[in-house]
Image: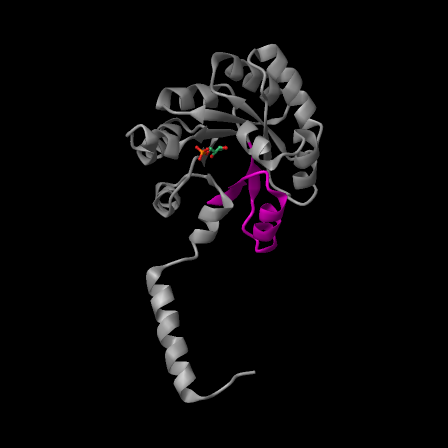
Amino acid sequence: MRFFVDTADVDAIRELHDLGMVDGVTTNPSLIMKSGRDIIEVTREICSFVEGPVSAEVVALNAEDMIKEGRKLAEIAENIAVKVPLTWDGLKACKVLSEEGKMVNVTLCFSINQALLAAKAGATFISPFIGRLDDINIDGLELISDIRQVYDNYGFETNILAASIRTLNHASQCALIGADVMTAPPSVIKAMAGHVLTDKGMDQFMKDWAKTGQKIL
Ligand code: E4P
C-alpha cells in the first residue's frame, strides 16, 4: 500500500520523506488554509522533493472553470494530480483532464455509486472519506471494502485512495482490505510506530540494562 501524506506542512512532509514514508501528498483547501501559504507556491515546494503524485484541489464549482484551474495547477509540476470534487461538474472535469493525460483524484466520495462514476470518467484516484462517514455513524471501512470488490469485479484501474484516515485501525484495515493507497495526516503515520507492548518492553529492557552497569558507547 502506498502512503500519501495528507498535509500542506512542508516540514512535516520532509521529515516523513527522509524516512522513505512518502509515496505522494494530498492537500485540500482546508489544508492550504491551515498552512497559511499560497497554493501555487506551497505546492511547487512540495513537488520539488516529492517524486510521487501531489494532489492539488480545484475550487471552481462549474466544469469549465474546474478544467481551467486544473490545467493551471497541472503546470506546477509533472507529478500533480488534479483533485476535483465528486459532483456532476467534477466528473465532467475529470473526463476532460484525464483525456489530456493528467492524473485526476476525485475527492469527497461517500458511496459505491459515486466511485463507479469516477472510474468510468477515467479517474486515476478515487478518494472515499472514511472518517467523515464514521462521523455520521456509517462504517467508512465498509465503503473501502465495497469499492475494492466492485472495482475488482469489473477490472477498473482507478486507484482506491483511502482518505480521511483518523485512527490506527483505519490504516491497518485499509491495508488488509487492499486499498491501493492511504492518505493520512503525519500524526497518524507516526502513531503507526507505536504499541503499548513496545513501550512496556523498552521500559523493562532499560531497567535491566541499568542493573548491568555496562555501556555500549
Ligand atoms: C484527502 O484527500 C482529504 O484531504 C482528507 O483525507 C480529509 O480528511 P479529514 O476528513 O480528516 O479532513
User: How many labels were placed on the picture?
Assistant: 0
Asked if residue 1 is positioned above or below residue 194 in the image, the reply reads: above
Coordinates of residue 80 in the picture (x, y in percent): 63, 32
Residue at point 35%, 41% (across, down):
177
Left or right? Give the position of 156 relative to 10.
Answer: left
On the question of residue 146 being in view, the answer is no
Judge left or right: residue 213 versus residue 73: left
State how the image is colored. Answer: one colour
Nearer to me, 22 or 119: 22
Q: In this view, does 191 lie above or below 112?
A: below
Q: Please, is residue 143 above or below residue 96 in the view?
A: below
Q: Position of residue 123 (x, y in %)?
A: 52, 25
State which quarter of the image contains the C terminus. Answer: bottom right
Comparing 104 with 76, the one in front is 76
Q: Which residue lies furthest to the bottom in this view?
A: 213
User: In the image, is residue 22 part of the stretch drawn in magenta?
Assistant: yes
Q: Is residue 40 magenta?
A: no
With 25 as the anchor, is 213 left or right in this view? left
Which region of the structure is painted magenta? Answer: 1-27
Give the percent coordinates (x, y) of residue 112. Answer: 36, 24
Residue shown at 34% from the left, 61% from the top: 196
In the image, 116 versus 87, the foreground residue is 87
Question: Residue 12: x percent and y percent?
Answer: 58, 47
* Displayed quadrant of residue 41: top right
Q: What residue is rendered at 54% in x and 51% in y? A: 21
Viewer can see residue 108: yes
Residue at 47% from the left image edge and 88% from the top image edge: 214
